[in-house]
Image (spheres, grey):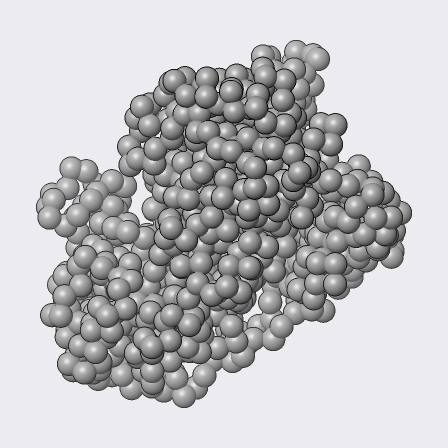
Amino acid sequence: MGRRGRKFAIAFAVVAATSTGAGAVIAGTGAGDDQDLAVTRQPANRDIERKVDKLVRQMTVDEKLQQVQLLSDGQITDADAKAGVGGVFSLTDPAKIDHFQHVAVEQSRLHIPILFAYDTIHGYRTTFPVPLAEASSFDPTVATDDFTISARESAAVGIKQIYAPMVDVSHEPRWGRIVEGSGEDPYLGSVMAASKVRAGQGNDYSADDKVVTSVKHLAGYGLAEGGRDYNTTDMSERTLRNLVLPPFKAAVDAGADTAMCSFNSINGQPGCANPHVETDILKDEWGFDGFIESDYTAVAELRACPPKNPDEGPCGHGVAADGPSAGALALNAGTDSEMVSTNIRDNGKNLLSTGQISMRRLDDAVRRILRVKFRAGLFDHPYADQTKIAERTLQPADRDKARAAAGKSMVLLKNDDNALPLDPAKSTAVIGPLGDDQHDMLGPWWGQGKDEDAVSVFTGIKAQNPSATFTEGCKMVDADLYDPANECPDASGFDAAVAAAKAADQVVLALGEVRGQGGEAEVRSVLDLPGKQQDLLEAVKATGKPVTVVLFNSRPLTLGKVVDNSSAIVEAWFPGIEAGNAVADVLFGKVNPGGKLPVSFPQSVGQVPIYYNHEPTGRPCDATSKYNSRYRDLKTCDPLFPFGFGLSYTTFKIDNLVLSSKTMQARNGSVQVSADVQNTGSRAGDDVVQLYIHDPVASLSQPVRRLRGFQRVTLGAGEKKTVTFRLDASDVGFYDNSGKFVVEPGEIDVFAGDSSKADLTDSFQVTGFGRR
C-alpha cells in the first residue's frame, strides 16, 4: 500500500499542557508497527493524479528537463521562468518572487508555477532556538510552535517549500551541523521530526500559512568520518536502519512530501546517487510519492577530479566520469531535482537518445514534482498575498512563544550550593564577549532574522535587574574563516572585567562560540572554549564572587575547566530572537530550567565519538584496570555530562516502576510501563521521565540502552504524578544485517529515570518470534 494509505509508524500524542505549564507527553513509538494513537493518512488525490498525467502528456522533453532543474536566487532569470524551470531556492525578496512567478504562470507555454524554497531551519523572521536546543526541551510542542510560525512567515512571502527538518543523527560534536539536528538519539529525533513536519505542513499544505517540508540529508551525513563536513561514511545495513533512518521514516510518515539527498557517500555510494536509499527504501519500501532534490551541486560532485569540463561545476566522489554521466547516475538512482548544477537538464536529450536514462524515469521525476506543486495549491493560487506579510511576521505572540521555547530548551548543568536562581535585588555584573551580543544569539541558519530584533543577555538581565552592568572582557568576532585574532585573543580587557566582578554581588559570565563557528563547513578539532575565554573565567573566579557561566554554542564542548571554575552553568545553546529575556527568566527563577541534554558532552575531544546508546563489548571500560576498552589518560569511562542529563532548581524522585505484564507476544503484544515522579523540593519545576530498554541476549549485539519514551511534566512542590508508556514489538525489535526487522524471544530490561543513567529497572519476556 502506498504511503498515503498507511498509518504513522512513529506514533505519538501531544497532550495539552496543564495549567502549570507542563510540556508535551509522549507515548509510544514504532519501528514499523501501528500504534493505538496512530493517525490515518489520506489516500492519494485522484483528481490531482489525473491533472498530473494530463500535464505530463502535454510536455515536451525540454519542458520536462526544465521541471527537474532547481536554480538558486543568483541563477534565476526571466528566460528560465519562461522556459518552465521547476524550482528556485534562497530567493526571499517577495517582489522578485512575485515577479518570477508571474513570468512562469503567464508566459511559460504550460503555465506551470515555480516552487520557491528556503532553508527555514529554526525560524524565518521570528528566530527560535537552534534545533539542538529545541531537542533539549524534550517537548515536541516547542518544535510545533517553531514550525507553525516558520511556515506562516515563509509562505507569506511566496516560499512554499522549506528545507527542513534536518534529522541527521550524529555522534560528532566536532561536526558543525550537529546544531541543526536533534542530537545522538534516533527516537528523540523521530519525535521532533514528526512534530515539525506536521506543524509545517498541517493537514493540507495548500493553505496559505503552510509549506511543504523537505526532510534532510538522506542519509548518514551526521556520521561523517572525523566529523568533517561532506566526508564519507561507512556503515552496515543495520546501523543505517536502526540509527540513521528512523527520523527520516518518522518525517515521511508524518507527511513530508520532499526530501534532500546528502553530500556524503555511504559505503562508496554518494547520497544523490544511492538507489538503495533513494529508491529501494524511501520510494518503494516506504511508499514516498513526493520528490527528492539534490543538495547544493551534489550531482556535479559525483564526478572525478580533476574534471574533464570545469564549467560543469565541482567534482569529487569519482563515481561519474563527466557531467552527463553524473546526471544519469543521479536521476537513475532516484534524485528527481538537481540543485544549482545543470547536468540533467543540459544533457537530458542526449542521455535519452543514448539510452542512459529512460523517458519513464524522467516522467516519474516530473510527476513527483508536479504532484507536490498541485498539493501545495500553486496551480490554483500561485501568488502570495503580499498585503498580509506584515501581519503574519514577527508578531508579539510569536515572540512570546520563542521566549517560552528558549526557556524550555536551556539545560542546567551545574548549581553548587543553590547558586541559582540569582537574586534580582542584588547587583549583577554581566561579563563576557557574548554578554551584550544580538548577532550571535540568532545562531546558524537564522533565516531572515535581524540582529536588531534580537534581545542580548545584558538587555534581558537589565530589564529584570536594573542595576546590572556589562563589561566585555574580550571580543569574539563572527568571521567566515578561522583567525585566532577573532576569538578572544588577548587579556587586555581582563582588568576591567575583574573590577566589574569585584563591584557586583553576583556575576554572569556569557561565554561560548559565535554563531559562525557552527553550521555548515564549521568543523572544529578542539572543543574547548575558543581563545582566552577560559582565562577570563579563571580571572573572574579569582575575585571570590559567585560566577554563573551561561554558554552559547553549536555543539557539546569540553567543559572540565569550566566546571572547576564556576558555581553554576547554564547551557543556553543559541536561544534565538528572545535570547536575553529567556536567559534572564532562567537566571532569576521566573523559569525553572527543565531541559535535558540531547547529546553527550565528552571529557575531552579524544573521547569522541562518545554516546549513550553504544554497543557493549567483551571488555567494557574500567578505568581502574588495563586490558579493557578505556583511555589510559582518563580516570573515568563516562562523558562529562551524559545524554538526558539536566538539573533543576528543585529535586525529583522517580520510583514505583510497574509493568502491566511480565510477558509480551512478539507479533501483537504490548506491555504498559508506568512510574511515579514526585517533586521532592520546595518550588514547582519540570522533569523529563525517560524510558530506556536493553536486549541483553540477541542474535546481534544490541545497544546498552535505547530510549523508547519520554514525558516532560510540570509538578508543584510535593506533587506526584504517574507517567505511562506503552512498549510493543516495534520497540523491542531491530533490523538485522539483511535489512529485515526481527523480534526475537527473550528478556528485555526496562530502565526509568531522568537521564540515560537511569537505574530504576525491571524486565519482561518476549515470547514467540517475529520477522518482516
User: Residue 524 location in percent, x, y?
Assistant: 40, 29
User: Residue 755 location in percent, x, y?
Assistant: 71, 40
**Left or right of 582, for residue 436:** left
Res. 388 image quadrant: bottom left
Residue located 51% across and 33% down the image: 469
User: Residue 196 location in percent, x, y?
Assistant: 52, 61
Q: In this view, does 217 lie above or below 754?
A: below
Q: Is residue 589 among what the camera can see?
A: yes
Number of numbered callouts drawn: 0
Q: In which quarter of the image is the C terminus?
A: bottom right
Q: Is residue 597 among what the camera can see?
A: no
Q: Which of 228 and 663 is in front in this view?
A: 228
User: Residue 638 location in percent, x, y?
Assistant: 65, 26
Q: Is residue 368 above or below residue 266?
A: below
Q: Is residue 534 above or below residue 115?
A: above
**Left or right of 684, for residue 391:** left
**Left or right of 480, for residue 106:** left
Residue located 26% across and 46% down the image: 302
Res. 90 image quadrant: bottom left
Res. 119 image quadrant: bottom left
**Left or right of 99, for residue 21:** right
Residue located 59% across and 55% down the image: 404
Residue located 15% across and 37% down the image: 306
